[in-house]
Image (spheres, rainbow, N blue to C red):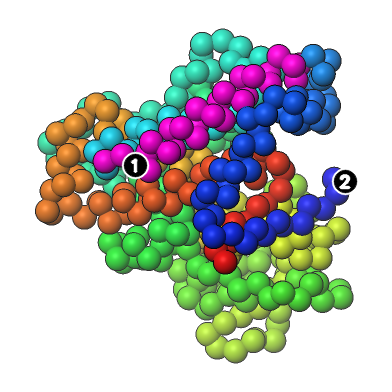
Amino acid sequence: MDMVSQIRRILCDSPEQKMWNLFLLLENEATVRTFLESKYRKHGVEHPSRAAFRAAQPLMYHVKQARTYYEAARRSDLFVRPLLSYYGMMTLCKALMLTRVPDYPENTSVLRHGISTRKRKRGDYQFFADEVRVQREGLFPELARYQGRESLIGENWTLKELFSLIPELQDGYRQLFPEETLFPVAVPEVTSVPNRGMPLVLEDRILDALHLTPRGLVNRLNRFSPGGEVRFTFEEDPVSVPRFLLFWHHPFISHVNQWERGFDHPLFREDMHGNHWLSPFQRVESCLPEMFVHYALLFALSMLCRYEPPLWGEMIYGMASEEMVLIQEFLQVTQRKFPNLILNELFEEKILFQQM
């Protein structure tokens, strides 16, 4: 059993700047060698000290290049921003891969995007209906394998589905589509109640969306709980209409905010402020982990930006384009959130940067 990692909350004037300041730790060679050697020992890499020596400079320059891409994306015009954001995101993903595979990339096939969209955008092209599909080779499936998410390979999602999975976009999403796809979960500060678990409060409308009773929801959550460590129970006595009470159980952890993995459940999401959300998706494969959601959306947007300039220009500058409500907001959110997701993976803890 690994030691429980507390969530690190950092109060600062500029969360985005402070986040990138932490990345500077990975632009110092001595620090990076120590960091990588520790990682490689943990993952059973042969000769961890030698491996760290080989991988230190590549990791440093991947982080530096990613930071440069993100800085350029922040200053750029919307017409080219998705391309810069996408390459910044890919470079951070490669840095993450180097913490597992010292000689990454081992071959050219792992350098492919690993994901695809429809090649030809026809005259009746509908942005939200476009699909992305995970390929067998490339960076996306390599990340999926090392994250224990091999089941994602071969799966596909519409862009509408992907937008619906990001908590920060929920308000804009509901303006465009008459549906709610993420429901807030209230998590009290109290730790586990003896013999009952950690309480969490949900609103009744998620039961309407799923056509389930509270007991049915608990059964669904337990059915999709990975590893079997985490389970949910139902409070028989109602809290008050229109809310109901569930309990979260973990054999070693008394509160979800004491664990960097959060709820560790595919149907739960988390925003940048540490608030939790629950998805009512019937198909659990639709609940793509958020790191992969950003990857897929940025890939789709960057392909439009790069290969379909007339279509992309009409989408972002056309007066009748409703897609831009979500596209612009997503590009703002991913600028701040995706590097934070990678930072959490690199340091194996949840780091929340909060405005003072």
Left/right placement of residue 299 relative to residue 223 reads: left
Question: Which comes sooner in the sequence, label 1 or label 2?
Answer: 2
Q: Position of residue 331 (x, y in %)?
A: 37, 47
- Residues 154 and 71: in front is 71
Left/right placement of residue 228 relative to residue 62 reads: right
Q: Position of residue 160 (x, y in %)?
A: 35, 50
**Residue at 75% over, 71% down:** 198
Q: Which region shows up in magenta?
A: 51-77
In the rendered image, residue 237 lying in the magenta stretch gets the answer no
- Residues 193 and 222: in front is 193
Q: Position of residue 19 (x, y in %)?
A: 58, 47
Left/right placement of residue 178 relative to residue 234 reads: left
- Residues 317 and 124: in front is 317
Quadrant assignment for the C terminus: bottom right
- Residues 88 and 141: in front is 88
Which residue is identified by label 2? 1
Against 170, residue 224 (above or below) is above
Asked whether residue 150 appears in the rendered view, the answer is no
- Report the predominant secondary structure element of the magenta stretch: helix
Left/right placement of residue 168 relative to residue 37 reads: left
Amino acid carrying mark 2 in the image: Met
Asked whether residue 325 appears in the rendered view, the answer is yes
Amino acid carrying mark 1 in the image: Arg
Q: Secondary structure at mark 1?
A: helix
Q: Which is in the foreground here, disc 1 or disc 2?
A: 1
Q: Position of residue 50 (x, y in %)?
A: 79, 14
In the rendered image, residue 55 lying in the magenta stretch gets the answer yes
* Numbered mark located on residue 75 in the image: 1
**Residue at 37% over, 38% down:** 73
| Number of numbered callouts drawn | 2
| Quadrant hosting residue 56 | top right
**Residue at 69% over, 86% down:** 237
